[in-house]
Image: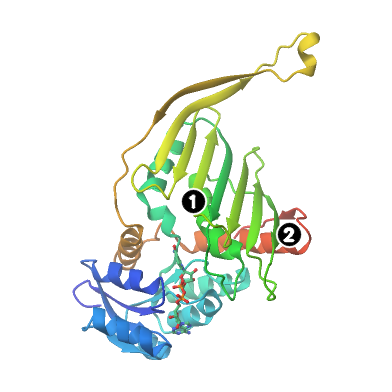
Amino acid sequence: MTQNIVKVAVIGFGYWGPNMVRNFNAQTNGEVLYVADFREERLRVAEQLYPAIKTTKSPDQAILDVEVDAVVIATPVFTHFELAKKALEAGKHVLLEKPMVTTSEEAEILINLAEQKQRILMVDHTFLYTGAVQSIKRLVDSGMIGKLQYIDSTRINLGLFQPDVNVLWDLAPHDISILNHLTDEKPYSVQATGVSHTNNGIENIAYLTMNYESNIIAHFNCSWTSPVKIRKFLIGGDQKMIVFDDTEPTEKVRIYDTSYHYTEKRSDEEKRRVLVDYRVGDIQIPKIPMIEALSGVAADFIAAILYQKQPLSDYVSGINVIKVLEASQLSIKNGGKEVKVSYW
Ligand SMILES: NC(=O)c1ccc[n+]([C@@H]2O[C@H](COP(=O)([O-])OP(=O)(O)OC[C@H]3O[C@@H](n4cnc5c(N)ncnc54)[C@H](O)[C@@H]3O)[C@@H](O)[C@H]2O)c1
């Protein structure tokens, strides 16, 4: 590492890789040295955009170059493990795209390797770095919405059918990582159902329910087959409720001063009726800093390397998302049966 500049190789220059290159190059302490991709046409695009960056069809060439300090992996999920393992073995710091890998065994191997080599292993849970989620985290931590009761997320659009993972592995890492960030409590079990409308058996629509000891319930609806794009995340507290709509250009977060009160004392005549008082108050829209989340991801990764600290979206966050996804997969296979989740 020269003059505290972290030199980065980005593997994978498809849809997401270019965003990584742009954001790492924009960091004062970061510089992209290499872009590696199997596809010639993607390398030509990278060369046009960044004439100073070396390009290669060989991920090994980029990973093993002594000048490279850190490797950012933005390739399809099934390639993450081998590429990250090679990079860690070569003594490089690694930032992996979500989801971290395809099994918790693979995640554990990478974690042990990172610890043994004393290298940073981070996962890009992008949403933790958005102004919206940071604002929601402050609201939840401040106690403003009261006791957390439910989370209800809809993440659907006409999305790219992934060849290697189902829609939950593709989209739910966002929701699971947000939820694990908002509350220290982890779900003890999950139930999931899903369906594949293609002949490869990979579910393109799936529903995941996460159960918590403290009576919180979370439900995620994920689909690649919706005609409209919906990115709505509801957080219900017993005092107030928050709606995070990521399709809104600016006013993404709304706090509803809405709650209900269940009346305990009931006369004999009232016993058959549920007595609930509703309170509907104002709606507040907090000001949210317009920052690009990936810029925060790149800055956190570089700072973790330079100052030897764990990033916010660390490997614990990565593997615990994988644990929930594995349990969900098992549940789908067993027709929605409840499956307990064990954490790292
Ligand atoms: N954080 C987010 O919000 C977000 C958004 C989109 C995608 N992603 C993640 O980014 C990753 C990549 O997704 P994408 O949509 O960019 O995929 P993509 O298919 O568009 O791009 C992947 C690129 O990697 C290249 N590639 C594949 N295997 C390779 C290898 N072994 N060595 C070198 N190059 C290789 C392919 O040629 C392709 O150009 C996935 O893990 C995905 O989940 C994250």
Residue at numbered disc 2: 331
- Helix, strand, or loop for circle 2? helix
Residue 325 rendering spot, x and y as whole percentages: 62, 61
Q: Are marks 1 and 2 in contact (CB under 8 Å)?
A: no
Residue designated by label 1: 231
Q: What residue is rendered at 41% in x and 77% in y?
A: 14
Give coordinates of residue 149: x percent, y percent.
59, 36
Tag 2: amino acid:
Ser
Which residue does the image show at 42% across and 47% down from the upper left?
A: 133
Task: Specify the quadrant of the image occupied by residue 31.
Answer: bottom left
Q: Work out whether residue 129 or residue 234 is closer to the camera in this orientation and state it.
A: 234
User: Can you say whether 166 is above or below 293 in the image?
Assistant: below
Q: Amino acid at mark 1?
A: Arg
Q: Is residue 125 above or below residue 278?
A: below
Q: Is residue 6 left or right of residue 86?
A: left
195 relative to 135, above or below: below
Residue visible at 41% across and 41% down in the picture: 253
Q: In the image shown, does 248 or 86 lie closer to the viewer?
A: 248
**Colour approach in the figure:** rainbow
149 left or right of 51 in image: right
- The residue closer to the viewer here, 288 or 8, is 288
Residue sticking out furthest to the front: 227
Query: Where is the C terminus found, in terms of image quarters?
Result: bottom right
